Amino acid sequence: MTKLLVFLGAFLVTTAILSLVYASGQVKKTPLDTDSVTRLSGEAQVAGPDGLENTPVKAVSITHADSELSTGEVILFQNSSCLVRDPNGDAPDCVAADDPSGTLLSASTSTFATDRRTAMSVPDFENLPADAERVEGLVNKFPFDTEQKTYPFWDGLVGGTVDAVYQGEEDVDGLATYKFLVTVKDQPIEIADGVAGTYNTEKTMWIEPRTGAIMDQQEHQTRILDDGSTFLDLNFGFTEETVAANIESGKSNSSQLALLTRTVPLVGGILGILALLGGFALSATARRGRHTDTEDRAPALV
C-alpha cells in the first residue's frame, strides 16, 4: 500500500507539472485545421447617380488555414471577403467584379501568416507568396490569454496597424468578454479604384480572453470623397447566427483550456502531494512498528 501511494503521488505530481509547463504551451496554439465563415449584415448609404442610396447589405469573410504550408509555430491563412447589396434578403454571398447589377460593393483576398500563440502577424514567414501584402499586428484574432491593454490591429484600408484600445469587461450572451475599440479618423486612402478620399471607422470587438477569439463585432465606417461628399456610410456587424455560433465555440474552447491548464495541474498536484504524504506517513509508521517489535524481543541483560 505504501509503495502504491508513493508511486501514485509521484505520477500525479509529474502529470500536474507537465500539464502546467508543457501541455499549456501546446494547447494554446491556433489549430492548423482552422476553417471559418463569418457573416455580417447591416445598412449602408452608397453614392449613386441620384445621390445617396439606402440599401441593406451583407458580407461574408472566409478564412482557411493552409496546414501544409504552416509550421508548428506559424500558421498561414488565406482570406476572401465580399460586401454586397442585399435589398431583398436573398443576394448571393458574392458576385463578379464586372457584374452589371451593381450588387457588389467591395471584395478582397489576402494571404497572411500569424504566430500560433501570440496571433501577431509574421510578415517575413518563408512560405508566404512572393506577392503577398505585408501585414502586421493582429489580424483575425487576439492572443491566448488576452490582456487588458492596447494592441496593434491590422486595417487593410489604412495599409497598416491601428490601435485596438481596451474598453472594459462585458457579458455577451452569458460569456465574459473583453471589449476593444478601433478608431480611425480622416485617414487618406484610395476609397475605390483610382478614387481618393478619407476613411473613418469605429469598430468594436468583443474578445473571449482565454482563447483570444472574436465573439462579436460591430462597425460604423464612412468613406468621404475629397469634395466632402459621402461615398459610403456603412453600419454592419456579425449576424445573430454568427455570434451564437461563436459564443458556443468560445464557451467550449475556454472550458477545455481551463481544464488542461488549470484544473488538471491544480487537482493533480494536490492529490499527488496528499498521496505522497500518505505514503510517507504509512512508511514511517511501519518503521516505528518494526523498531518497537525489535525492542520487545531483545534479550534481557544480566
Image (cartoon, rainbow, N blue to C red):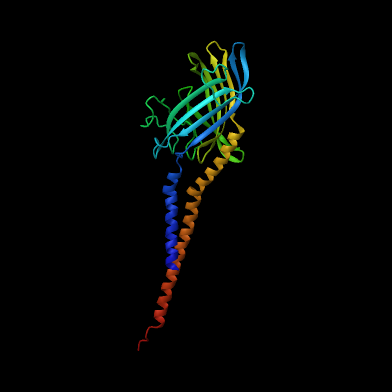
Task: Judge whether 269 appears above or below 199 on screen.
Answer: below
Residue 55 at x, y = what percent? 62, 20
51 vs 82, left or right, is right
126 vs 33, left or right, is left
Q: Please name the residue shown 42% across and 74% down the image.
A: 288
Q: Please name the residue shown 45% across and 27% down the image.
A: 110
Residue farthest toward the bottom in the current orientation of the protein? 302
Q: Please name the residue shown 44% across and 49% down the image.
A: 20
Residue 72 at x, y = what percent? 39, 40
Task: Judge whether 262 appears above or below 155 on screen.
Answer: below
Quarter holding the C terminus?
A: bottom left
Q: Quadrant of residue 50?
A: top right
Q: Quadrant of residue 228?
A: top right
Asked whether 60 or 220 is in front, the reply is: 60
Counting labels gives 0
Asked whether 98 or 302 is in front, the reply is: 98
Residue 82 at x, y = what percent? 53, 25
Residue 137 at x, y = what percent? 44, 30
